[in-house]
């Protein structure tokens, strides 16, 4: 008999919050290689909320999938950034309704008094910069996992 490991725990949807840059690193690692249509971006200025509906690769499940020789999975997740004061983008055509974007990382650039910028770096040199009053980000899975259409894990050539 051996001790239980983290990977032996019951599977549950991700539901995380980030209030510090260190917390945001965890969320960033989980949303790496998430894909989403440009139409699934929403900024509600009156609510000071920016949200993305992502098709997230389940990095947390990759070791288990490999160990059990089963398919890799994706899941739809909501990435929500609150206290947003302004949104700017670079390198993407928001009017192209067929555009599918790939999220590489989420990073916080601190400013004064807890304010700063949340930077969403996209594949292909695109980015979205959110001016925030304070760092307040949540990631929540909203569907059951499904087999990744590519049937493979994302790879990066460095």
Image: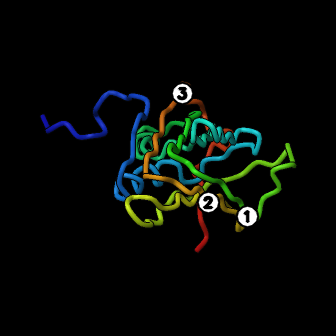
Pointer 3: residues within 10 angstroms few (<14), some, or many (20+)? some
Q: Quadrant of the C terminus?
A: bottom right
Q: Residue at x 62, y 53 (%)?
A: 86
**Along the line of sight, which residue is nearer the eye, 76 or 136?**
136
Picture coordinates of residue 147 (x, y %)? Answer: 60, 33
Q: Residue at x 12, y 34 (%)?
A: 1
The residue where tag 2 is placed is 129
Frontmost of labels 3 and 2 is: 2
What is the number of callouts on the image? Answer: 3
Query: Helix, strand or loop at disc 3?
Result: loop
As drawn, the label of residue 142 is 3
Picture coordinates of residue 130 (x, y %)? Answer: 59, 55
**Along the line of sight, which residue is nearer the eye, 23 or 74?**
23
State if disc 2 and disc 3 touch (CB < 8 Å).
no
Query: Helix, strand or loop at disc 1?
Result: strand
Query: Helix, strand or loop at disc 2?
Result: strand
């Amino acid at each position: 008999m051996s001790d239980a490991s983290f990977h032996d725990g019951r599977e549950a949807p991700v539901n995380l919050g980030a209030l510090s840059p260190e917390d945001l690193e965890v969320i960033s690692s989980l949303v790496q290689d998430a894909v989403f249509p440009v139409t699934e971006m929403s900024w509600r200025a009156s609510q000071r909320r920016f949200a993305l509906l992502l098709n997230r690769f389940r990095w947390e499940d990759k070791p288990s999938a490999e160990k059990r020789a089963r398919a890799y999975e994706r899941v739809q997740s909501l990435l929500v950034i609150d206290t947003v004061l302004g949104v700017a983008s670079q390198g993407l055509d928001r009017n192209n309704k067929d555009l599918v974007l790939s999220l590489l990382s989420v990073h916080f650039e601190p400013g004064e008094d807890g304010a700063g910028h949340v930077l969403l770096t996209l594949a292909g040199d695109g980015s979205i910069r959110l001016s925030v009053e304070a760092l307040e980000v949540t990631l929540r899975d909203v569907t059951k996992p499904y087999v990744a259409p590519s049937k493979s894990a994302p790879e990066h050539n460095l």
